[in-house]
């Protein structure tokens, strides 16, 4: 088993380009319950639990995946990390004040044209006392579709130190840099875009509350809530504006990197539950049928 000492602690934020940013912002703010923390340079910043931003929405001529941000481990220096990225073949740029809330970051164009930002610290404030809407606990993971998924996989594993934790039919590959089953999910298809963005909810009853809020706001649940095989998360999906797929989940597998296995759960198929390739038909272990093409988002 590979050593587990990843460079990053988790996914910090995802920035999306939208043809109708006001409509997209309204969904993240009023339905999902993120708080608007600022608007600058045509971008709107939205936050959960006191982070300056978890989601950024910018005006674009078409729906786009602008960048994603990862927080670096406390003991890693930004300049040293930029050099490491350079040695791995990526032209790293150190940027100051490129966005509010993050004073300094390192940016690269990663495999498949995916833009990565790495930062040490983000401004934080007190979380709103009574969040509106669904109010997820936190941003959990992003799923990325790319024809360069294999190169992205190698980057996450070999440069950032993530562990592989499962795959679905060798089409979708899950990797983590913390105790979540996955922090990123890489889907190898010809398109280049976000497949979905996932937020963690409190528990199963929150799934029901979320489904009611979504239905009332014209963004009904497309699939689920149902339990996945890989990751065993109890997940429901809906479309935000621009057909950006959003996953709301609970009960995701907890990865134990020192053992290279997932913490046992009563709904597991294997004991111990070790990373493996899952068949497509185990997308839902409850056999919940898909009424839309979840593979394509
Ligand atoms: Fe997901």
Image (cartoon, rainbow, N blue to C red):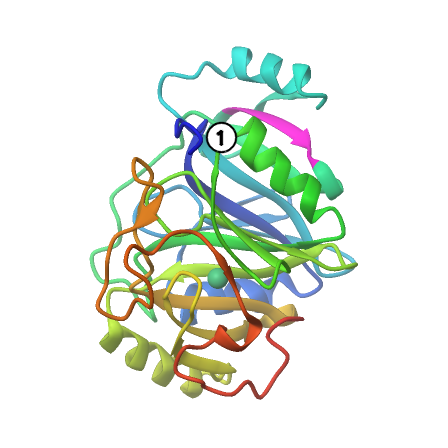
Q: Indicate yes or no whether the magenta region holds residue 229.
A: no
Q: Position of residue 51 (x, y in %)?
A: 36, 42
* Image: 216 above or below 274: below
Q: Position of residue 263 (x, y in %)?
A: 25, 52
Q: Quadrant of residue 178?
A: top left
| Quadrant in the picture for the N terminus | top left
Residue drawn at 55 percent across, 85 percent down: 290
* Image: 194 above or below 159: below
Of residue 294 and residue 169, the one placed in the foreground of this image is 169
* Image: 107 above or below 254: above
Of residue 88 and residue 198, the one placed in the foreground of this image is 88
Residue drawn at 22 percent across, 62 percent down: 130
Magenta span: chief secondary structure = strand
| Highlighted magenta segment, given as a residue range | 104-110
Q: Position of residue 201 (x, y in %)?
A: 31, 64
Of residue 266 and residue 212, the one placed in the foreground of this image is 266
Q: Position of residue 98 (x, y in %)?
A: 59, 30
Q: Is residue 284 left or right of residue 194?
A: left
The residue where tag 1 is placed is: 161
* Image: 179 above or below 160: below
Residue drawn at 45 percent across, 77 percent down: 284
Of residue 223 and residue 101, the one placed in the foreground of this image is 223
| Quadrant in the picture for the C terminus | bottom right
Q: Is residue 180 left or right of residue 283?
A: left
Q: Indicate yes or no whether the magenta region holds residue 109.
A: yes
């Amino acid at each position: 088993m590979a050593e587990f000492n990843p460079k990053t602690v988790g996914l910090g934020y995802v920035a999306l380009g939208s043809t109708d940013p006001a409509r997209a912002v309204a969904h993240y703010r009023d339905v999902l319950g993120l708080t608007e923390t600022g608007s600058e340079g045509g971008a709107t910043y939205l936050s959960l639990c006191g982070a300056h931003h978890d989601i950024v929405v910018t005006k674009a001529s078409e729906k786009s995946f602008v960048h994603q941000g990862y927080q670096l481990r406390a003991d890693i220096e930004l300049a040293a990390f930029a050099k490491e990225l350079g040695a791995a073949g990526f032209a790293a740029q150190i940027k100051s004040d490129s966005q509010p809330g993050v004073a300094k970051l390192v940016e690269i164009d990663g495999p498949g044209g995916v833009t990565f930002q790495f930062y040490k610290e983000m401004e934080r404030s007190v979380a709103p006392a009574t969040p509106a809407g669904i109010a997820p606990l936190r941003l959990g993971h992003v799923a990325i579709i790319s024809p360069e998924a294999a190169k992205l996989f190698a980057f996450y594993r070999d440069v950032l130190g993530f562990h592989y934790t499962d795959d679905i039919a060798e089409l979708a590959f899950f990797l983590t840099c913390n105790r979540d089953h996955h922090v990123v999910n890489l889907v190898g298809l010809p398109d280049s875009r976000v497949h979905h963005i996932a937020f963690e909810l409190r528990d199963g009853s929150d799934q029901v509350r979320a489904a009611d809020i979504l239905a009332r706001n014209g963004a009904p649940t497309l699939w689920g809530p149902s339990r996945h095989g890989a990751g065993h998360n109890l997940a429901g999906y809906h479309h935000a504006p621009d057909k950006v797929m959003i996953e709301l989940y609970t009960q995701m597998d907890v990865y134990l990197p020192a053992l290279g296995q997932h913490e046992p759960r009563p709904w597991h198929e294997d004991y111990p539950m070790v990373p493996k390739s899952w068949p497509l038909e185990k997308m839902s272990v409850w056999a919940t049928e898909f009424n839309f093409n979840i593979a394509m988002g």
